Image (cartoon, rainbow, N blue to C red):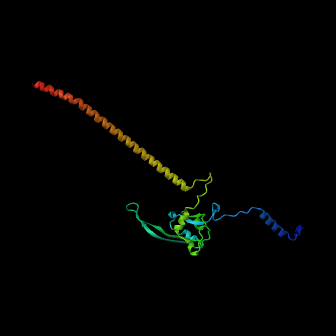
Amino acid sequence: MAASLPHPRPRIPGSGLAKGLAVTLRTMTKKTVTAQYPDVQPELPPRSRGVIALFEENCTVCMLCARECPDWCIYIDSHKETVPAAIPGGRERSRNVLDRFAIDFSLCMYCGICIEVCPFDALFWSPEFEYAETDILELTHERDKLREWMWTVPEPPALDPGAEEPKEIAAARKTAEKLEAQRAKEAQEAQQAQETQEAQEAQEAQEAQEAQEAQQVQEPQETQQVQKEEEGEE
């Protein structure tokens, strides 16, 4: 036989009102804190989504951000340029050149999809939030303004001490070490060449001095011999 459910306790009339008044009384006794904005800037969380910044040098005009944007608020214009061959006989290459990159923040819903899908790290979150306008048309910001916000992007958080070193940093470090080793080798070779040249110059100077000394010794002997021959003829 199933156990019978316990009967609910009878509610005291006005208990809900009493609880609400208790919360009000507790709040009234606490000191109020007023944010003195805009005189005092608020302390934002590290990963605040304020505005999207553009690092133009990394953009390859792949259009991936514009295609994935659910609001279609990213506008990109570009043209192709021909790059001459790097070596004689090589093929010319074409590359995309960015002409316009604009974001309409009146449509943007700050989902961050464009930042996540960018394969070249050209878009970043900036904590800036003071970009309100009186005209909705002025909320479409071009690449110059997006570039200015790039300098407000905070540094990424430090990695876990036990985490693997990022591939980009490892590759950059290996390249730097390789260049440093090459420069050290070139400096050593230059020093050896200089030492060899100095030794050769010193040897040539010593040989010239020895030849000069030998000539100085030989000249008096020749003079004496000529004098003896002249005396014999007389």
Image point (15%, 28%), residue name: 226
Image point (37%, 40%), residue name: 196
Of the 4 image quadrants, the one containing the N terminus is: bottom right
Front in this rendered view, residue 52 or 98? 52
Q: Is residue 195 visible?
A: yes
Residue most extreme to the left: 234
Tell me if 195 is positioned left or right of 60 in this view. left
Where, by quadrant of the figure, is residue 220 drawn? Answer: top left
Residue 183 rendering spot, x and y as whole percentages: 44, 48
Residue 130 rendering spot, x and y as whole percentages: 60, 67
Q: How many numbered dots are placed on residues in this image?
A: 0
Of the 4 image quadrants, the one containing the C terminus is: top left
Residue 113 rendering spot, x and y as whole percentages: 60, 67
Residue 101 rendering spot, x and y as whole percentages: 52, 69
In this view, 57 is above or below 175: below
Where, by quadrant of the figure, is residue 154 drawn? Answer: bottom right
Front in this rendered view, residue 154 or 76? 154
Tell me if 132 is positioned left or right of 206 in this view. right
In this view, 167 is above or below 62: above
Image point (12%, 27%), residue name: 230
Where, by quadrant of the figure, is residue 92 drawn? Answer: bottom left
Q: Is residue 62 visible?
A: no
